[in-house]
Amino acid sequence: MFSFLFGSPLAVGSQAPDFTLSDQEGKAVTLSKLRGKNVVLVFYPGDETPVCRKQLCEFRDQSQQWKAKNTVVFGVNPASAKSHSSFQSRLSLGFPLLVDEGRRVAELYQSKGLLMTSRTVYLIGPDGRVRYAKRGKPDPKEVLATAA
């Protein structure tokens, strides 16, 4: 309905843009250093909002499934490390939240949106190619079904 505002996510089969971002603890995460694993990127608008909380908790609750599929999960938005740390700790997410200052990585992943990060989920295969890309809040089982 509002796709004219957000455009489409990256195409399945395309090479995922490389990036380095810090997580809530200040640890650098570089996508290309995760080759050989499936990587789920959950771009979400904000910490401590009801839909974002629900979405990230759904991935937390599927941790056995994604770990069994050689998959790592990251939440991504422009909130501060302090905000991410509080949010991640309070919900016991079990995966890092990346600080996308200026939403530059969201822009690379066509998830920047006009005023906030567009809710978008990607699964990047071990070869660095996009295997899944969808706007909104897809079920983690649907996302993980595309893992290599």
Image (cartoon, rainbow, N blue to C red):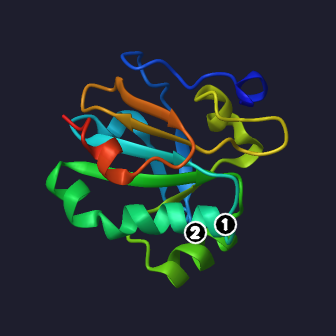
- Asked if 144 appears above or below 108 in the picture, the reply is below
Q: Nearer the viewer, mark 1 or mark 2?
A: 2
Furthest-left residue in this view: 68
Q: Which class describes the residues within 10 Å of circle 1: few (<14), some (14-19), or many (20+)?
A: many
The answer to whether mark 1 and mark 2 are in CB contact below 8 A is no
Outermost residue, right side: 115
Q: How many marks?
A: 2
**Residue 54, how many percent across, how many down?**
53, 67
At numbered mark 1, what does the secondary structure look like: helix, strand or loop? loop
Q: Amino acid at mark 2?
A: Arg
* Residue sticking out furthest to the front: 1
Relative placement, left or right, of 20 versus 104 is left
Quarter of the image where one finds residue 14: top left
Give the Cα distance between marks 1 and 2: 7 Å
Which label number is shown at residue 53? 2
- What residue do we see at 42% from left, 64% from top? 58
Q: Relative to 21, is 60 on the left or the right?
A: left
Residue beneath disc 1:
47
Q: Amino acid at mark 1?
A: Asp
Which residue sits at x=25%, y=55%?
66
Could you tell me which secondary element the residue under label 2 belongs to? helix
Is 37 on the left-hand or right-hand side of 132?
A: left
Residue toward you, 124 or 134: 134
Q: Reply above or below: 128 against 48.
A: above
